[in-house]
Image: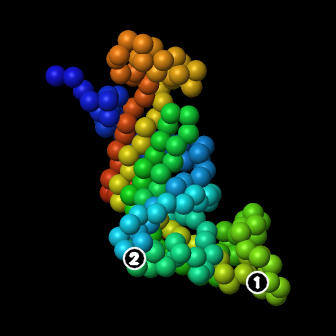
Amino acid sequence: MSQSASDQGRSDDVAPEKKIEDLYALIEGIDIAMMTTRLPDGQLVSRPMSTQKRRPDVHLWFVAVSGSHKIDEIRADPHVNLGYFKDFEWVSVSGQATLTNDRESIRRHYQPDWKAWVEDEGGEMNGGPDDPRFVLIEVRALGVTYFKRTDPRPVVMFKVLAAMVTGSTPDVGETRHLDGSEMPTNKGR
């Protein structure tokens, strides 16, 4: 019996610590996630979101502006999916989002590039760390699947081209899975 293309290179025998290390290395190398939320009519919508610097108290987190549609969608249904893709590697995170406008946390984690996403309306609404429009979206991973290349990009491209010619399936990496219980425990949750 042959393996399906989605199961080839499957490696679930890797230690959870190594899977987590590789997961975060992939995410840090990709930066932009496509965050999928559910609209009130049940349809799904995705938009690009910049993954913020890793914190020990949350699996993944993002910054948003109050009043945006994604905030309303998360309030109605906190289940989200985060998709990342770059150079034949990808990550899919199924998770539950929590919204926080805790001013102390926002000031502590504030990055100057956030200012680009809000108009300077004067006073505290200037895009700075005290701007009340900033909301943090913290995502607790319930399940993760990712694909990690085992060869450098040029070798992967060669193997893919060779597979197209021969009709075979290229062995270019490993698919790994993590469930929520394998993810680092969030303190205070």
Label 1 belongs to which residue?
125
Looking at the image, residue 143 sits to the left or right of residue 117; the answer is: left
* Spatial separation of the CA atoms under disc 1 and disc 2: 29 Å
From the viewer's side, name the closer residue of 29 and 188: 29
Q: Where is residue 123 in the image (x, y as percent from the top left)?
A: 82, 87
Q: Which of marks 1 and 2 is nearer the N terminus?
A: 2
Say which quadrant the C terminus sits in.
bottom left
Looking at the image, residue 14 sits to the left or right of residue 60; the answer is: left
Q: Residue furthest left?
A: 1
Q: Badge 2: few (under 14), some or many (20 or more) residues near its Cα, within 10 Å?
A: few
From the viewer's side, name the closer residue of 69 and 181: 69
> Do tag 1 and tag 2 residues touch (Cβ < 8 Å)?
no
Say the numbered circle drawn on residue 143.
none
Q: Where is residue 114 in the image (x, y as percent from the top left)?
A: 72, 67
Query: Quick check: 77 above or below 85?
Result: below
Label 2 belongs to which residue?
40
Q: Residue furthest top?
A: 166
Query: Quick check: 25 above or below 117?
Result: above
Check disc 2 and give the amino acid type. Pro
Query: Quick check: 11 above or below 161?
Result: below
Instruction: Say whether residue 70 is visible.
Output: yes
- In what element is the residue under mark 1? loop
Q: Position of residue 110 (x, y in %)?
A: 70, 69
At x 21%, y 23%, the residue is 2
| Residue 111, image quadrant | bottom right
Name the image colouring. Answer: rainbow
Check disc 1 and give the amino acid type. Met
From the viewer's side, name the closer residue of 130 and 1: 1
At x 35%, y 48%, the residue is 178
Dot in front, 1 or 2: 2
Looking at the image, residue 23 sits to the left or right of residue 135; the answer is: left
Looking at the image, residue 132 sits to the left or right of residue 182; the answer is: right
